[in-house]
Image: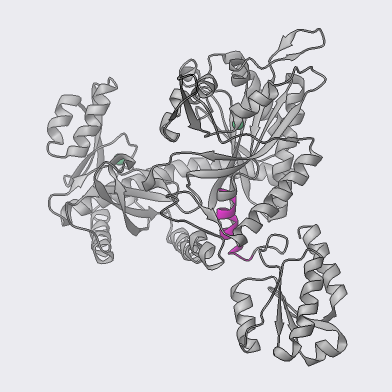
Amino acid sequence: MIIDACLLIINLYFMSQQNLKLDTMRHSASHVMAAAVKALFKDVKFAIGPTIDEGFYYDFDLGKQTLSAEDLSKIEAKMQEIIKADLPIKREEVSVKDALKRVKGQIYKEELIKDLEKEGKKKVSFYSIGDIFDDLCLGPHVKSTKEIGPFKLLRVSGAYWRGDEKNKMLQRIYGTAFATQKELDEYLKMLVEAEKRDHRKIGKEMKLFTFNDLVGPGLPLWLPNGTVLIEELEKLAKEHELAGGYLRVKTPHLAKEEMYKISGHLPYYVDTMFPPMVMEEDNGQKVTYYLKAMNCPHHHMIFAAEQRSYRDLPVRLAEYGTCYRYEKSGELFGLMRVRSMQMNDAHIYCTEDQFASEFLAVIDLYLKYFKIFGIDKYVMRLSTHSKEGLGKKYIDNEKLWLKTEDMVRNILKKGKIPFVEVADEAAFYGPKIDVQVWSAIGREFTLATNQVDFAVPERFGLVYKDNEGKDQTPICIHRAPLSTHERLIGFLIEHYAGAFPTWLAPVQVKILPVSDKFLEYALEVKNKMFSQGIRVDLDDSAESLGKKIRTGEQEKVPYLLIIGEKEVTAKQVAVRQRVKGDLGSQDVDGFIKQIKDEILNRK
Ligand SMILES: [Zn+2]
Ligand SMILES: [Zn+2]
């Protein structure tokens, strides 16, 4: 375990070096793509072309024209030409005035340059590819087009300029590039697999969730099968949280504006919150409410509801709290980007002395969950402050930052937890840890965040009495190991390809009588299992056994129990397991005992 963790840290170090190289090359590929589009289409206007986690994109305004798959092949061919020509990529700095002249008519670039000017920039940089293309860009880039590795254009989609639906819809071409053909091939293979496992597709097939226009975009409706998943996950969380000394609370879905001003969410996060509701109270006074985007302030108020002594600490308050965030409609994506989410939230209020053990306990909880879900590749990303950001992006208390970051770092090292450190990405009130996991097919997801908060308790005046009777401010740990139901279930659908382990599966057992003659016994078996808390279904259709088995397999039910003449006589069932296939005939009671054990132990 020790060796593994160290190796992973070393690998991650090389990975981050490589990532920078890969990122630079992909960014150059996006410029080459823009150069190819320029060569092939008249009157194109260029927006932005950054890299993303798994490749790059560029947004184009092509007037009324929409790009087809055929166009993508043409663009790819042109890109090959440019790469082969080995054109130099050069940087040049120009004044804002010259820059505006240079991009004349390119309305998006003009807007970007004017914004840079507003930010106080006097000079901006351009990157040119030979003499065929020239773009406003911070860089860095590779030195020549020949350094661009094997690439592939993946798809076209619509994207609003600046992600705002009030703006024009542009066309975004996504692509990716790798250092070697082998890596590209592996990636493309993974994409094919990911498409088969697409959580939106499987969610529909398995009747897990749906969306409805009357309810609104980004607001998932959980169907009975999906609700089984939710309830099993909550059961898992509640068991572990109870054992970990958490107390459960319940809080309303909205609160007054004033509270979010104290917490600091307003005005900073106003764009990600639903618009305010202004109410007139009985006394004629106007009061503004907001739907909650976070559960923290409500929990802080519960901490403040009683006088606390050092003897009461740590106080761990847990809630599956529903939060609402106003994601732009262009950014909504299945369950992964939604506007309402149920969060596996908790806030731990502790003394400085208790911080290390509390934080480690949270990390331990993550590891327990990873084991249950068979997640064997994960990394914790520790985001720290930056000196320059103090007083602006971050609470102005350098000593406290350094001390807390050191505590977190030491805990991770001591616990042999693989982690990478990223400067200048902390939350405004303390360092944070993003937990990244890889699904069974090797796709990366950011599941959840832990945050250390040494500022907000003070803003709310939260205190406890120390052993001398003096008021002290507690440290608060925000944590959500099981993420939100939406994000976690989106991940689990891909991870398991919908074939959930028995404890999670919406239907755990399906009984398939060979014909109507055996229906009575089948019903008897069903009732027996049902009374034992097993989620069991009976296929009493007139279909052939072969068809019934195929349907059960498509539904990814862990166990199919076949009942024919032989089984009725022997009072048995013929067991067919999802992975292992035929397991032969078993006594009903024996089967029930075994499956209950499997469910209880979440095997
Ligand atoms: Zn660029
Ligand atoms: Zn919180």
Please name the residue shown 80% across and 77% down the image.
525
Give the main secondary structure, helix, strand or loop, of the magenta stretch. helix
Quadrant of the image occupied by residue 112? top left
Is residue 414 in view from this perspective?
Answer: no
Closest to the observer, 280 or 569: 280
Closest to the observer, 240 or 540: 540
In magenta segment, residue 19: no
Closest to the observer, 376 or 231: 231
Model colouring:
one colour
| Image quadrant where one finds the C terminus | bottom right
Total number of numbered discs in the rendering: 0
Quadrant of the image occupied by residue 9? top right
The vertical placement of 592 against 165, above or below, is: below
The vertical placement of 335 against 322, above or below, is: below
Closest to the observer, 447 or 516: 516
**Residue found at the far front of this picture:** 282
In x, y percent, where is residue 410? 70, 28
Quadrant of the image occupied by residue 164? top left
Horizontally, residue 493 falls left or right of residue 167, namely: right
Please name the residue shown 68% across and 20% down the image.
304
Please name the residue shown 57% across and 13% down the image.
397
- Ligand 2 located in image quadrant: top right
In x, y percent, where is residue 13? 56, 40
Please name the residue shown 16% across and 40% down the image.
106
In x, y percent, where is residue 22? 42, 46
The vertical placement of 164 against 182, above or below, is: above
In x, y percent, where is residue 95? 19, 24
Is residue 424 in view from this perspective?
Answer: yes
The vertical placement of 401 against 7, above or below, is: above
Horizontally, residue 140 falls left or right of residue 432, namely: left
Q: What segment is highlighted magenta in the picture?
A: 487-499
